[in-house]
Image: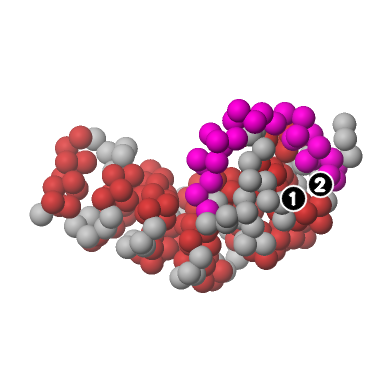
Amino acid sequence: MTNHTADGFIQELKQHQNEAEIEKMKKFFKGSDENTKCLGLNMRTVFQIAKQFTDMPLTEVERLLESDYYEVRMGAVSIMDFQAKAKKLPEENRQALYELYIRRHDRINNWDFVDRAAPSVIGTYLLDKPKDKLYEMAHSSNIWERRTAMVSTYSFIKTGNTKDTFAIAEILINDPEELINKAVGSFIREAGKKDEDKLKSFLNKHARTMPRVTLRYAIEKFDKSTKDYYLNLKKS
C-alpha cells in the first residue's frame, strides 16, 4: 500500500480515472468554484480508496482539500468521515476533525461533501456540547455552511433529539437556494420518524408558505391522505 500521504492518495486515484466519465461527474458539482476539475472517477471507487487511507494525518487531509479536483476533495471528506466514525476515537482527534472542517469550509463547497462528513464530523462532535456554531452557520451567507447546519443535526436525530433539527429548519424555512430547501425537507422528515407530532406541528405552521420542494421531501413517508392534506394546505 502506498504511504498515507496526500500525494499517495492522489496517485492511487489517478490509476482509476476515466476521461469518459469526466462530463458525467461534473454534473454532480453544484458549487460556484470555477476552478474545480474532475478526474472522472465514480464515487464508489473514491470511497473505497479513501477507506484504505483512513489513517492519513490531518495535515495531509488538508492538502487534499486544497486540490482543484472534485474527487480529491471528496476523498478528503470521506477520510474525515471514516476517521470520525472510528470506535474509541480520542476526543482530541474528534475535535481536530471538527476544527479542520470548520476552518476549511471554503473547500467543502458542494452538497455531497457536506452530506458525506457533516453528520459524523460536526454533528457527532457537538452531541454533548453547545450547538451555537450550527445556529451561526444557519445564518451564514455561504450556502454550504447553511447546509452543514441542517445536515449535521442528523447525528442528533439518531439519538432521539429533534429539537435542533426543527429549530434550524425554522431559520432556513424560506431559504432562496433549492439545495437548502431539499436539506430542510429531508431532515425534518427524518426527525418526524422520531417525533411525528412535532413534524406535523411544524408543517401545520409552515406548509402554506414553505417552498413546495421542502414540503414534498418532508411528507414523503406519510400515507396518501396525510400527504394530500398538506399539499392542499399549500394550494389554499
The 10 Å Cα crowd at callout 1, few under 14, some 14 to 19, many 20 or more, is many
* Residue 211 appears in the picture as rendered: yes
SS at mark 2 in the image: helix
Q: Residue 48's quadrant in the figure?
A: top right
Q: Residue at x 64, y 57 (%)?
A: 107
Name which residue lies at 52% across and 41% down.
28
Q: Amino acid at mark 1?
A: Leu
Residue 180 x/y as whole percent: 41, 55
Please, what is the three-letter code of the amino acid marked with disc 2?
Ala
Which quarter of the picture shows residue 58?
bottom right
Q: Position of residue 231 (x, y in %)?
A: 18, 46
The residue that disc 1 covers is: 64
> For the residue carrying disc 2, how many other residues have a C-alpha within 10 Å: few (<14), some (14-19), or many (20+)?
many
Q: Which mark is residue 6?
A: 2
Residue 22 is one of the magenta-drawn residues: yes
Q: Residue at x 62, y 50 (%)?
A: 36
Q: Earlier in the sequence, mark 2 or mark 1?
A: 2
Read off the magenta span: 4-31
Q: Nearer the viewer, residue 63 or 126?
A: 63
Residue for point 63% across, 46% down: 37
Q: Is residue 131 above or below residue 121?
A: below
Q: Position of residue 118 (x, y in %)?
A: 58, 53
Of residue 105 and residue 97, the one placed in the foreground of this image is 105
